[in-house]
Amino acid sequence: MVDVDKALQTQLANIQKKTGKSLKELYAWLGATGLAKHGELRDAAKSELGLGHGDTNTLVTLYLRATGASAAPAAG
């Protein structure tokens, strides 16, 4: 496994441990917020789940990729 992959897996394991929720449950929670923009989802997760910026940024990026939404910021 590449070091970056290993680091990501460790970060995801730590997120799940901190929240007491599985990745599937976290994705369901993100979907239930009704929010679609990366920043909105990130801020909601920071506020409600008590995670830091880096953890929520990673979580939301992976969630958006898994759901087929773009993880890239909107142009504007």
Image (tube, rainbow, N blue to C red):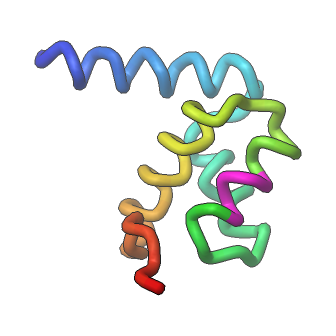
Task: Examine the structure image and report whether residue 43 is included in the region drawn in magenta.
Answer: yes
Q: Image point 38% across, 67% down: which residue?
A: 72
Task: Give, as a single range, the part of the protein colored magenta.
Answer: 40-44
Q: Image point 69% across, 29% down: which residue?
A: 52
Left or right: 32, with 76 as reference point = right
Q: Is residue 69 above or below residue 62?
A: below
Q: Is residue 70 above or below residue 13?
A: below
Q: How many marks?
A: 0
The quadrant the N terminus occupies is top left
Q: Which SS does the magenta portion mostly show?
A: helix
Q: Is residue 70 above or below residue 27?
A: below
Left or right: 60, with 66 as reference point = right
Front residue of 50 and 75: 75
Q: Position of residue 17 (x, y in %)?
A: 67, 17
Left or right: 68, with 29 as reference point = left
Q: Position of residue 69 (x, y in %)?
A: 42, 75
Q: Position of residue 43 (x, y in %)?
A: 74, 53
Q: Is residue 28 above or below residue 1?
A: below
Front residue of 24 and 31: 31
